[in-house]
Amino acid sequence: MLTTPEFTSVEGAYLALLQLTTEDAEHRIAARGNDAREVIGVGFRLSDPRQRLPYLAERKANPVFQFAEALWYLAGRRDLEMMGYYAPSMRASSADGIHLGGSAYGHTLFSPAIGAEQPPFDQVVELLLTETDSKRGYLPVFAAKELADRDNPDVACLAGLHLLPRDGELHMVCNMRANDLDCGLLSDVFSFTMIQEYAAIQLGLRLGTYTHFIGSAHVNDRDSERVKRVLDEADSRTTVPSFAFPEMPEDTTAATIAHVLEHEEALRTNQLRYNADHIRNLGLHPYWQQVVMLFELHRQIQHDQTSAVDPELLAALAPGPRWLMERKWPVCAAAADGGAR
Ligand code: 5HM
């Protein structure tokens, strides 16, 4: 078969790739101190790129981090302050303790390069608005200069994103030089499909398919126990949890992203606290209200020394993010057990 295998949601692709590296790894690698099992040159397609979250209790996907990273990309940022809060392990990737480098994909895509007038993303959107069936909507991310410093701690894993408007839909193809299948893949697919959906809105198109190609697809040995537990769960479950991820509102612009991030910052720095009604009255679309609710729950987990988060706020979450929060954070499970379920 010359085309990529197709899955509806990221969960199916994630499980198939874990299975592949567990049973049919081609190589054992040890680059930069990471012992891993590797398969070279794999790809998959998602027919519904909105189904960008896995519902596996053993994997414990973190929707707070996922939205934070996607918004950080869409806002064109590279500050460690925001991402280091949600993912402290990312601090080790910063060369100066202030910025992230190659992995700040949004900075590469949504901020103008030095000497350029427009961000590459805007340039591509402008092109695609005028050139029917264009093949030129490519957004390179990896840059050869990243390899000039052999000690560079953060070389982009994303080579580039290719936007392809066809028959009223926006398809996207993602090329990665490397993907950590257990850790990086899920957050990458989440964020990149958010970028695709955001691009589709800017172009007035429906969301098409998402295709993901990987040069080095690998699972680090330190994650192999969890991978086994995830595969066992997938094999043994009798019901498969399934929650439809909602559509990004059609009026989403850069100003919407900035508005959501204002609330994110106030909550991250513990300057505000919200209940569900406050959030409903912020003037945000219900889709973005859900995201602010996740940030407020996370604020309670990080900053309040409570044994359970606000059960009303947890109950105000849509079933999908609530399912994930209850598996990820014991304080959310405790609040759910306290009667809000
Ligand atoms: O030594 P190297 O630069 O290839 O290590 C980067 C590791 O982070 C690889 O395992 C890569 O697959 C993973 N990674 C990922 O999967 C990193 C980033 C950040 O650029 C990412 N996805 N987005």
Image (cartoon, grey):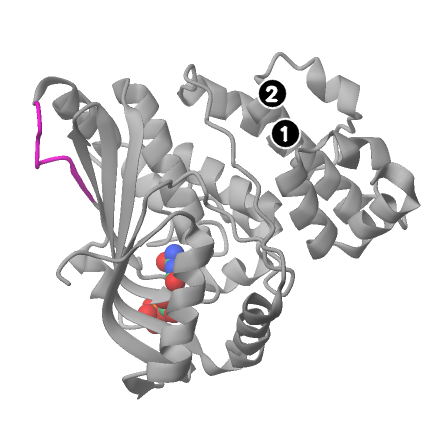
Does any atom of ligand 1 lie closer than 8 Å to the CB of label 1? no
- Identify which residue is drawn at 46% across, 26% down: 248
Is the C-beta separation of discs 1 and 2 under 8 Å?
A: yes
Quadrant that contains the N terminus: bottom left
Q: Position of residue 213 (x, y in %)?
A: 24, 58
Majority SS type along the magenta span: loop
Instruction: Identify residue type, mark 2.
Output: Pro
Q: In which quarter of the image is the C terminus?
A: top right
Q: What stretch is highlighted in magenta?
A: 132-139
Residue under label 2, please give it: 286
Classify mark 1: residues with Cα within 10 Å, few (<14), some (14-19) or many (20+): many
Counting from the top left corner in percent of width and height, residue 276 is at 77, 24
Nearer to us in this view, 254 or 294: 294
| Quarter-of-image position of residue 142 | bottom left
Specify the amino acid type for callout 1.
Gln
Image: 233 above or below 78:
below
C-alpha gap between disc 1 and disc 2: 6 Å
Instruction: Identify whether 307 is placed above or below 228.
Output: above
Q: Is 339 in front, or is 137? A: 339
Q: Residue at x 50, y 65 (%)?
A: 92
Q: In which quarter of the image is residue 77?
A: top left
Number of marks: 2
Q: Of helix, strand and loop, which one carries label 2?
A: helix
Q: As drawn, is 277 to the left or to the right of 191?
A: right
Q: Can residue 12 be seen in this view?
A: yes
Q: Circle 1 sits on which residue?
A: 290
What secondary structure is marked by label 1?
helix
